[in-house]
Structures are given as C-alpha cells and as structure tokens.
Amino acid sequence: QVQLVESGGGLVQAGGSLRLSCAASGSIFRIAIMDWYRQAPGKQRELVARITSGGSTNYADSVKGRFTASRDNAKNTVYLQMNSLKPEDTAVYYCHVFANQHYWGQGTQVTVSS
C-alpha cells in the first residue's frame, strides 16, 4: 500500500512562487517514477511534471522553464518548485505514482491571482 500526502499549496499573486511537497510511504519510493498532475475547474487532469528514480525530469510545455521537480529519496519526498506563477496555473495539484495500480494524493489547491 502506498500513501501520498501533498502540502504547500496556497494563494499567491501572479509572478510569485510556491513549493509543493509530496511525502510518500512505502518502500517503492526509491524505484518509482513520481508524477505531478493538476486539475483546473472544468478541465481534465493533466500531467505537469515527471521525475524518475534517478532524478531525470520531464515537463508539460506550459510549465517548462518555470517549474522544477526534485526528490529526496532519504525523505521519501518529491517537490515541485513553481516560479513565475500565472493565473492559468490555478488548479488542484496531485502527486501520483503507479505501482501495480494508480495511487493519488489528496491534492493541494494552488490559486494564482492576477
């Protein structure tokens, strides 16, 4: 069983920054590919960033150059540093891992005001 707990969301003005954290339980963390997704009201959930066990990353075009994913395997935690935030980044952000099944965190709200 895997549990994911996100934190770090909040309200920020456009141009500001936030850092999200996702703490994972379970021994799979160190070998797992971890994802950050987001879902805005009325829109489908979309993949924002992916980080492999070795630290390689991929990003959605909409966040490239602004968001940075990282991980601390010793703490079983992944992070999403979000800079130069825009109102269109407003969404609930979810941590995700696939380990024989999909696991999702509870989500954390990010609101960017213009």
Image (cartoon, rainbow, N blue to C red):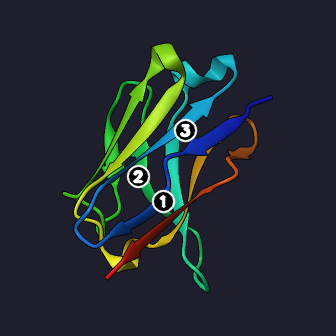
Seen at 35% across and 62% down, the residue is 60
Which of the two marks, 3 or 1, is nearer to us in this view? 1
Q: Amino acid at mark 3?
A: Cys
Q: Total label count? A: 3
Distance CA(mark 2)–CA(mark 3) = 13 Å
Q: Secondary structure at mark 1?
A: strand
Position in image of residue 2 (x %, y %):
74, 31
Q: Amino acid at mark 2?
A: Ala
Which of the two marks, 1 or 2, is nearer to us in this view? 1
Q: In the figure, residue 12 lies in which quadrant?
A: bottom left
Which of the two marks, 2 or 3, is nearer to us in this view? 3
Question: Alpha-carbon neighbours of circle 3 within 10 Å: few (<14), some, or many (≥20)?
Answer: many
Q: Secondary structure at mark 2?
A: strand
Q: Compared with residue 94, is residue 62 higher up or lower down, i.e. above or below?
A: below
Which mark is first along the chain, 1 or 3?
Answer: 1
Which quadrant holds the C terminus? bottom left
Q: Which mark is residue 53?
A: none
Q: Amino acid at mark 1?
A: Gly
Seen at 51% across and 28% down, the residue is 77
Which residue is farthest left?
65
Residue at the spot of label 2: 49
Question: Alpha-carbon neighbours of circle 2 within 10 Å: few (<14), some, or many (≥20)?
Answer: many
Position in image of residue 103 (x %, y %):
71, 44
Position in image of residue 32 (x %, y %):
55, 29
Which residue is farthest bottom?
42
Distance CA(mark 3)–CA(mark 1) = 15 Å
Q: Which mark is residue 22?
A: 3
Which mark is first along the chain, 2 or 1?
Answer: 1
Position in image of residue 70 (x %, y %):
36, 35
Residue at the spot of label 1: 10
Which residue is farthest right?
1
